Amino acid sequence: MTTFKLDKVHSGVNFSVKHMMVSKAKGEFQDFDVNVVGDINNPEGLQVTVNVDPASINTNNDDRDGHLRSGDFFDVENYNTIKIESTSIKKVSDDEFEMTADVTIKGVTNSETFAIEFNGTSKNPMDGSTVAGFDVEGKLNREKYGLTWNAALETGGVLVGKDVKLSANFEFVVE
């Protein structure tokens, strides 16, 4: 059994969503934890749980961040965790995997699929520890989780797209 310790300094959870039909609003969640159980040599057998604090959202715009924390979106006063729990991991190629997971946002759970790239392991020259890295990509329809607020645009379309693209990278010290 491998012990995985998240290195938050070298990890991140980012997202982007269409803004006004012509560009993207980007941001990150600054407070998150990832728990991985299993054997690094058997990625298909890993159990992964990710907990994200939606109040830690940062889009570099205080007004927008406040709106995203409100009942129109994440309702952080009533829902303080976004949870992702793996249900299966399938090998796609030597370093690529597909993870199916239950995603819970605002008390609503849906099954979602994420692409995972295992970047391998390396020896840290500073302390001799072994580190492993993973990149994760996915797309969620925010409306399936009750994040339905929007505004119509005079030129047609809406202010906020429904599909949210997720991009995360995680580095772990492994033993």
Image (cartoon, helix red, strand yellow):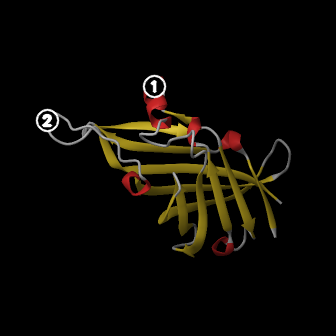
Is 126 above or below relative to 108?
above
Q: What residue type is labelled 2?
A: Thr
Secondary element at tag 1: loop
Q: Which residue is drawn at 68% across and 70% down?
A: 46
Secondary element at tag 2: loop
Q: Nearer the viewer, residue 147 or 113?
A: 147
The residue at the far top in this view is: 62
The residue at the far front in this view is: 78
Q: Position of residue 131 (x, y in %)?
A: 75, 53
Q: Which of marks 2 and 1 is nearer the N terminus?
A: 1
Residue at numbered disc 2: 155
Is 29 above or below relative to 90?
above
Residue at numbered disc 1: 61
Q: Where is residue 5 in the image (x, y as percent from the top left)?
A: 77, 53
Location of residue 21 by image quarter? top left
- Residues at discs 2 and 1 in contact (Cβ within 8 Å): no
The answer for how far apart the CA atoms under marks 2 and 1 are is 24 Å
Q: Which of 161 and 129 is in front in this view?
A: 161
Q: Can residue 97 be seen in this view?
A: no
